[in-house]
Image: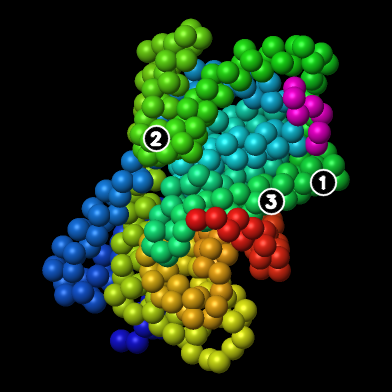
């Protein structure tokens, strides 16, 4: 059977199962299992699929996910985050959409911790959704910034995903990390500007709430008192990774331990808080790992059926300008990102893309950063972007998939603007020439 027919059958089956209400992870697993049985030798293929799923869940970088989630849950359930949010609100002042802006600021910090979109989205949701709902923010102003911040986390260095991408693509890790700083924070600035302009034009999206005027002395004191717990945890995790003394997993484990210690020091830790934090972490972690396993299995079917290679050959089978070749490659990454987790996409595409990039004389670091940006777009893109379903699983039942789709698409457009800027001005992503 030709790969286009297989591809249509796979996607059609997925849409049908999700339309009748089957959860996305189980839809992927069900379709993948059927495809593997038919295409890869029956029971023998299913055995290979089991091994593939096991391998996808035993990647070392994934072990940071439960620790970062636990860290966020401890900070939230102990009440330390609520105090930090109040301090941020005082410092941010009365700007439009202040909590959405705070979400981006916190998201930028988490981006320097894990680089794991699903983990960061889950942590930000647990930290920010209750507070923003309490302040009666519109759903779009709650969901959009959280998902956009989570997707952006894979770009802001130091990111484990960036290191993995550089390893697979065989480019300088140092150049890749340093050159990702400007694109990452450029997108962050675009997001903040968009939220502020939109909330200025429509204040009902983010209702202003009363902030008592405070002096600079009070602001500094409140920051030292209430931001210290959150700041010290993030500083330890970020600092250890930047200094190269710890892997993301080791840093995450230490950060979660320090979160427990600081919660105890601030007399906010008790059995109830520990129980809630651990149970919530287990639930979110199982959900995330199930999605990753299903996506990894699906990527195996795409590769085995020839669909992945067929799409690439179709896109590159014509003599066109190198810029159009680049755009086609980025479009493929965005498309695959709607269905597959980032590591699988990199494993499928980079071994094919990078020889083409080098043969066309493009800067591999520039292209890798563009691929990172497109991976983040794919995670936000309806209907199957992983960040969308992580958002659904970590928010209250009244939040529907329609709400999530509506909140995500503006940030997809903003990401495309960011990609266009990096394509138009390559120096934004190639300014550092060191090793």
Residue at point 37% right, 39% down? Answer: 247
Q: Nearer the viewer, mark 3 or mark 2?
A: 2
Disc number for residue 245 = 2
Q: Is residue 321 above or below residue 225?
A: below
Disc number for residue 186 = 3
Quadrant of image for the N terminus: bottom left
Q: Nearer the viewer, mark 1 or mark 2?
A: 2
Is residue 355 shown to the viewer in this render? yes
Q: For label 3, count other residues whose C-alpha is less than 10 Å away and answer few (under 14), some (14-19) or many (20+).
A: some
Q: Nearer the viewer, residue 242 or 286?
A: 242
Q: Is residue 76 above or below residue 310?
A: above
| Disc 1, SS | helix
Q: Nearer the viewer, residue 166 or 382?
A: 166
Q: Is residue 154 left or right of residue 415?
A: left
Residue 419, position as x, y percentages in the image:
65, 63
Residue at point 61% right, 49% down? Answer: 181
| Disc 3, SS | helix
In magenta, the rendered stretch is 90-96
Residue at point 82% right, 46% down? Answer: 197
| Disc 2, SS | loop
Residue 126, position as x, y percentages in the image:
52, 33
Picture quarter containing residue 67? top left
Q: CA distance from mark 1 to mark 3?
A: 17 Å
Q: Which residue is mark 1?
A: 197
Q: Earlier in the sequence, mark 1 or mark 2?
A: 1
Q: Nearer the viewer, residue 339 or 191?
A: 191
Q: For label 1, count other residues whose C-alpha is less than 10 Å away and answer few (under 14), some (14-19) or many (20+).
A: few
Q: CA distance from mark 1 to mark 2?
A: 41 Å
Check if mark 1's residue and mark 3's residue have beta carbons within 8 Å: no
Q: For label 2, count other residues whose C-alpha is less than 10 Å away and answer few (under 14), some (14-19) or many (20+).
A: few
Q: Earlier in the sequence, mark 3 or mark 2?
A: 3
Q: Earlier in the sequence, mark 1 or mark 3?
A: 3
């Amino acid at each position: 059977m030709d790969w286009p027919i297989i591809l249509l059958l796979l996607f059609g089956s997925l849409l049908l199962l999700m339309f009748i209400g089957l959860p996305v992870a189980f839809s992927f697993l069900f379709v993948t299992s059927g495809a593997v049985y038919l295409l890869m030798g029956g029971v023998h293929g299913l055995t290979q699929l089991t091994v593939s799923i096991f391998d996808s869940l035993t990647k070392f970088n994934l072990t940071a996910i439960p620790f970062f989630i636990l860290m966020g849950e401890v900070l939230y359930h102990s009440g330390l985050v609520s105090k930090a949010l109040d301090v941020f609100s005082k410092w941010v002042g009365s700007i439009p959409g202040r909590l959405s802006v705070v979400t981006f600021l916190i998201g930028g910090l988490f981006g320097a911790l894990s680089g794991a979109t699903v983990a960061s989205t889950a942590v930000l949701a647990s930290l920010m959704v209750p507070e923003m709902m309490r302040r009666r923010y519109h759903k779009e102003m709650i969901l959009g910034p959280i998902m956009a911040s989570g997707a952006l986390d894979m770009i802001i260095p130091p990111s484990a995903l960036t290191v993995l991408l550089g390893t697979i693509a065989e480019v300088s890790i140092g150049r890749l990390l340093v050159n990702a700083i400007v694109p990452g924070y450029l997108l962050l600035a675009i997001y903040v500007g968009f939220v502020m302009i939109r909330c200025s034009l429509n204040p009902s999206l983010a209702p202003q709430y009363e902030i008592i005027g405070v002096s600079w002395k009070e602001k500094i004191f409140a920051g030292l008192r209430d931001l210290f717990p959150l700041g010290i945890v993030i500083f330890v995790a970020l600092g250890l990774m930047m200094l190269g003394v710890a892997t993301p997993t080791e840093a995450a484990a230490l950060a979660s331990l320090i979160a427990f210690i600081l919660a105890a020091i601030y007399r906010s830790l008790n059995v109830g808080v520990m129980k809630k934090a651990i149970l919530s972490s287990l639930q979110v972690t199982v959900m995330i790992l199930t999605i990753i396993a299903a996506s990894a299995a699906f990527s195996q079917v795409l590769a085995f059926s020839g669909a992945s290679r067929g799409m690439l050959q179709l896109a590159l089978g014509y003599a066109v300008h190198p810029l159009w070749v680049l755009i086609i490659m980025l479009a493929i990454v965005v498309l695959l990102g709607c269905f597959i987790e980032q590591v699988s996409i990199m494993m499928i595409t980079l071994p094919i893309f990078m020889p083409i990039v080098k043969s066309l004389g493009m800067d591999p670091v520039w292209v890798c950063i563009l691929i990172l940006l497109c991976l983040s777009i794919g995670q936000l893109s309806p209907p199957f972007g992983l960040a969308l379903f992580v958002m659904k699983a970590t928010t209250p039942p009244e939040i529907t998939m329609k709400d999530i789709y509506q909140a995500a698409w503006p940030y997809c457009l903003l990401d495309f603007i960011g990609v266009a800027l990096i394509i138009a001005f390559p120096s934004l992503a190639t300014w550092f020439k060191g090793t």
